[in-house]
Amino acid sequence: MESNNGQNGDAPVIAIDGVTKTYQMGEVAVHALRGVSLDIHSGEYVAIIGASGSGKSTLMNIIGLLDRPTSGTYAIRGQEVGQLGKSEQADIRNREIGFVFQRFNLLPRTSAQAQVELPLFYAGITGTKARRRAVDALTRVGLGERIDHRPDQLSGGQQQRVAIARALVTQPSLLLADEPTGALDSKTTAEILDLFDELHAQGLTLVVVTHEHSVAERAGRVITVSDGAIVGDALAAQPTPAVTATNGFGSVLPTLSPARTAVAQ
Ligand SMILES: Nc1ncnc2c1ncn2[C@@H]1O[C@H](COP(=O)(O)OP(=O)(O)O)[C@@H](O)[C@H]1O
Ligand SMILES: [Mg+2]
């Protein structure tokens, strides 16, 4: 498939409509998502918040093409992707999406540079070009001086920066992060959130799953998930320019309430 052929430039980056996900556990059906509809536009910074077990990771895994909906549709920039085969999904994931996890998911005994080069290898980019792009990505997250360090030689926050560089090195249009600060202390959390602010200001579309209000508050839009359904979708009081530039969200934004005021830390 050619990169932009058949894609509508005005379409949301993410358009999810009536998505359900049911896990069959023997006799028991677990309804992890019960009909989620959601549009996310280019340049938005969206937080998905909800209690443990509410379906946040299930939703992120579907958005990130790591899993498929049981029913409903999912389009990326107007192209239906929810029911594509595994290898087609992997192609789109490699091209469009960067994914960051709570536990960093780095390879042990492997330098930061080699970790960050790996997605390029899968994209067919090797040698000097791959090396240069890995170093650029590590520099972008503030680790230009640490490219030879292995995970055991880096702090938790630095390891998460390596994971973010690895997610960004393929120049995705969408960065997804599932509880990215869940394993970090509050100071390191603040540093990672500052980095997300910078990336957002540079035009990246960000979706961050969290159960912490202090993390969600940094986003321009907060979606609340409860028991497999969206129960709240609100713009922050001071929406980012990228959000105000987007011309309305139609029926996907039932509430436009002001964001909660800052929670005292
Ligand atoms: N692979 C799976 N198999 C069976 N049940 C699952 C699986 N993944 C998640 N679930 C169930 O789906 C529900 C939502 O889980 P999850 O999306 O991980 O929630 P959250 O990320 O909000 O904590 C939970 O009840 C969980 O136990
Ligand atoms: Mg989760």
Image (cartoon, grey):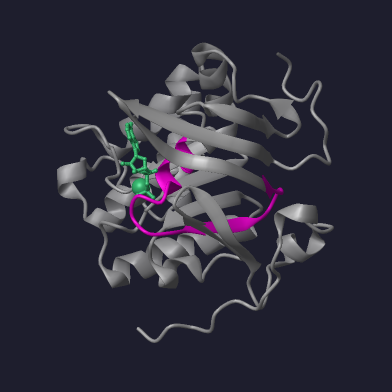
User: Is 190 on the left or on the right of 235, as rendered?
Assistant: left
Q: Is residue 121 or residue 160 the one in the foreground?
A: 160
Q: In this rendering, does residue 226 appear at all?
A: yes
Residue 123 pos. (x, y %): 51, 19
Using the image, determine if residue 262 lies above or below residue 110. Answer: below
For residue 82, which quarter of the picture?
top right
Residue 132 pos. (x, y %): 47, 33
Residue 215 pos. (x, y %): 43, 67
Indicate the quadrant containing the C terminus: top left, top right, bottom left or bottom right. bottom left
Q: Is residue 204 or residue 124 the one in the foreground?
A: 204
Q: Residue furthest front?
A: 27
Residue at the (15%, 45%) spot, across then down: 152
Residue 128 pos. (x, y %): 46, 24
Q: In this rendering, does residue 135 appear at all?
A: no
Residue at the (72%, 62%) spot, across then down: 243
Indicate the quadrant containing the N terminus: top left, top right, bottom left or bottom right. top right
User: Is 71 on the left or on the right of 40, as rendered?
Assistant: left
Using the image, determine if residue 188 lies above or below residue 157. Answer: below
User: Is 142 on the left or on the right of 231, as rendered?
Assistant: left
Using the image, determine if residue 15 lies above or below residue 46. Answer: above
For residue 186, which quarter of the picture?
bottom left
Magenta region includes residue 43: yes
Residue at the (37%, 59%) spot, across then down: 51
Q: Is residue 143 or residue 32 the one in the foreground?
A: 32
User: Is 122 on the left or on the right of 147, as rendered?
Assistant: right
Q: Is residue 103 or residue 110 the one in the foreground?
A: 103
Q: What residue span does the magenta drawing correspond to?
A: 39-61
Residue at the (62%, 40%) spot, across then down: 173
